[in-house]
Amino acid sequence: MRDDILRVERLSKHFRGLKAVDDITFSVKEREFLGVIGPNGAGKTTLFNLITGFLKPTSGSVYFKDRDITRLKSHERVKLGIARTFQVTRPFKKLSVKENVKIPAIVSHRDGKVDNVEEFTDQILEMVDLIKKKDLKAENLPHGEIRKLEIARAMATKPELLLLDEPFSGLTSEEISALQDVIARIHEEGITVILIEHVLKACMALSERIIVLNYGKIIADGSPEEICMDKQVIEAYLGKRGMEFAAG
Amino acid sequence: MSIEALKLPKRYKLVILYLIIAILLPFIIPSIYILHVLILAHLYVIYATSWDILTGYTGQLNLGHAMFFGLSAYVVGITNTMLNFPLTLSILIGIASAFLLSLVVGIPCLRLRGPYLAITTFSFSWVLFLLASSAMIWLSGGEEGIRGINTLLVGTRPNYYLSLFVMLLIVFFLYKIANSDLGLMLKAIKEDEDAALACGVDTTRYKLLAFIISGTLAGVAGAFYAQYMRIVTTDVVSLELSASAIAFSLVGGIGTIIGPAIGAYILTILFEGFAWLADYRVFVYNLIIVLFVLFLPGGIVSLRESLIEKRRRVSEHEG
């Protein structure tokens, strides 16, 4: 039986009257691959922001490896092993690809997670296939490679839990399958992954388990197959196209 | 051989050429007046580059940099003339006061994001100016200022060399920081603070560090100014001095350390050359700021870069 790496207990975030995240409880096992889906405005990104410390919850708690991290700042959570990417990519545009990855690598080095910053940086760039472009300014990369850079930067923090916020959005189908391989490899290395995704095909293919959010609440939790068959999900989120998708 | 390979030695050549000229200058041009202008230029180089490490590199807008320069200068003047402290002690206390001011302003402001730092630095420098020019005349001497401050070295030429030495030391120090891992962190914060946080960077800590370095070094310039001029008036906490930090940096090239140094040199000499401009200084500074933002936002340094870029393109075509 694997231990829980992340536990979210009765977590809520209200923006004025809006309950973006409404009393959510769930847990993620070590090495699990969890998909999070739901219509726009369902509270997926807010949930990520609460787990990574970019937002403070209205109520509830977040536990990472049985430690209460609800009050910790973002960078302290990174130090513990929680990394994220952003839905809207946020590369350091004026810095080189290598420098982008070197920044978290330096932090990892100072935290004693990495011995050699240069070697480690190159290793990460190799993994996401950006080593040849390491001297290019990040702003000169095509969108697909900026997505890879985002993941490289998160990986350079040496995470145990990686949260990916719509990494496939805006990509071509070739780029999607390339990135899908990268993410699968990361998971194979033993890293727990939580993936928010609109590209259902990729999400279904990668995830072992999926939770569905709607109006800030979890409306379904199960294997990809179960989610596809769930009537409530199909009605609330997938709609007609989802029915077709589920039917194959 | 590629231009990339030629670039570095050429940069060193320029620095060595500058050093030779700067060291020999008092022998070539014996004019006391010109040396005096250059001493001021050296102090403004420290002042401008110290502003640049916070605002140019870290992206935290400081609109009242004169408060560090001015507080330090006043503290040197007050402790030396009224409390009769030895000058070296006064200088240390002056610099320490700038350091403390950076903590007092930085700790609350840098936790927050948005315009708080800009507003607070602007207000603090303005309050200091009001205190010095009216509310605390008994201490500051108002328009008359504080006179009779001791000096470390008598004579223009010794002060020229001392100011040159201190300036070179500080510019070298800032240049090293800018090109170190710390500099990379600061640039990351400037580009995107949330992304830096997601990389695990303790952004509040690094911003505060940059602010402390920035304020303390401006305090060094202020203390030097007080002992060299031997008089401190409200000029040292004025709005125009705060504006000049921005103007110097924009002219030279913001976020480059070397750029603001060049800008401080050029504008200081220019203003002395056109002395009648002095009364319109704030206006001219603001005009310069607007013109550079519009037409050459990268400053003088960017001209060189675009020249290198152009040459590279030409050589690529030929190759």
Image (cartoon, rainbow, N blue to C red):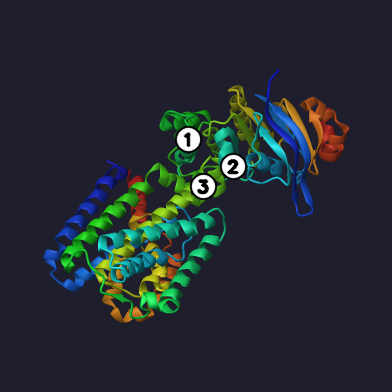
- Please check whether the numbered discs 1 and 2 fall on a single chain: yes
Asked where in the image residue A106 lies, by quadrant, the reply is top left
Q: At 36% across and 55% down in the image, what residue appears?
A: B257
Asked where in the image residue A164 lies, by quadrant, the reply is top right
Residue under label 3, please give it. B203
Toward the viewer: A15 or B270? A15
Q: Are marks 3 and 1 in contact (CB under 8 Å)?
A: no
Residue A229 position (above or below residue B52): above
Instruction: Say which amino acid is labelled 2.
Output: Ser
Name the element at disc 3: helix
Q: Position of residue B37 (x, y in %)?
A: 24, 70
Q: Earlier in the sequence, mark 1 or mark 2?
A: 2
Instruction: Say which amino acid is labelled 3.
Output: Thr
Residue under label 2, please give it. A74
A143 with respect to B190 (left or right): right
Spot the residue most to the top: A1
On the question of residue B50 being in view, the answer is no
Name the element at disc 2: helix
Q: Position of residue B85 (x, y in %)?
A: 28, 64
Q: Chain of mark 2?
A: A
A186 with respect to B310 (left or right): right
Residue A207 position (above or below residue A76): above
